[in-house]
Image: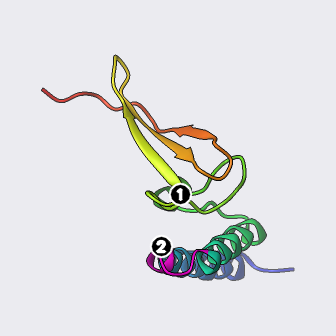
Amino acid sequence: MSSRREKHATKKIALERIEILLTRADGIYSEEPDLAQRYGDLARKIAMKARIRIPEKWRIRFCRKCKKFLYPGLTTHVRIKSGSSSRVVYYCDICKEGKRSKPFSKSS
């Protein structure tokens, strides 16, 4: 049976590896999209195995429907919807699914 300290260390290492993989995927997506997708898949698998959440700044870069790593401009179209509840909408070009962000307030 693992101690609490060992579980914490495992989760910390997993989070570091996820950060490294997703940073590299973001950097090479324009040259090698297949390798970047593989890095995104590996990061998701590490998170599932370690039972941790992917950080928020990277979580919005995954499609909820097809589970692919999204790169704005290549596999994602980003739109800003205005109105009473303004929000950003990310459209996946692979499966055509839309993903809305939290509404933000307009500053005067």
Q: Residue at x 68, y 47 (%)?
A: 95
Mark positioned earlier in the residue sequence (1 or 2): 2
Looking at this view, is 94 or 80 the one in front? 94
Q: What quarter of the picture does the C terminus occupy? A: top left
Q: Residue at x 54, y 80 (%)?
A: 16
Secondary structure under the numbered disc 1 in the rendered image? loop
Up-down relation of residue 31 to residue 95 (above or below): below
Q: How many badges with numbers are in the image?
A: 2
Q: Residue at x 51, y 74 (%)?
A: 29
- Mark 2 surroundings within 10 Å by alpha-carbon count, few (fewer than 14), some (14 through 19), many (20 or more): many
Q: Is residue 56 left or right of residue 66?
A: left
Secondary structure under the numbered disc 2 in the rendered image? helix
Dot 1 corresponds to which residue?
61
Dot 2 corresponds to which residue?
26
- Mark 1 surroundings within 10 Å by alpha-carbon count, few (fewer than 14), some (14 through 19), many (20 or more): many
CA distance separating discs 1 and 2? 10 Å
> Which residues fall within the magenta stretch?
26-33
Looking at this view, is 72 or 48 the one in front? 72
Q: From the top left corner, tell me how far across and down residue 1 is, in percent.
A: 87, 80
Up-down relation of residue 80 to residue 47 (above or below): above
Whether tag 1 and tag 2 are in contact, CB under 8 A, the answer is yes
Residue 18 falls in which quadrant of the image?
bottom right
Q: Is residue 46 left or right of residue 53?
A: right
Using the image, tell me which numbered label, if any, was put on residue 92: none
Residue 59 falls in which quadrant of the image?
bottom right
Q: Is residue 65 left or right of residue 92?
A: right
Q: From the top left corner, tell me how far across and down residue 3 is, in percent.
A: 76, 79
Looking at this view, is 26 or 55 the one in front? 26
Residue 32 included in the magenta stretch of the image: yes
Which residue type does callout 2 highlight?
Answer: Asp
Residue 79 included in the magenta stretch of the image: no
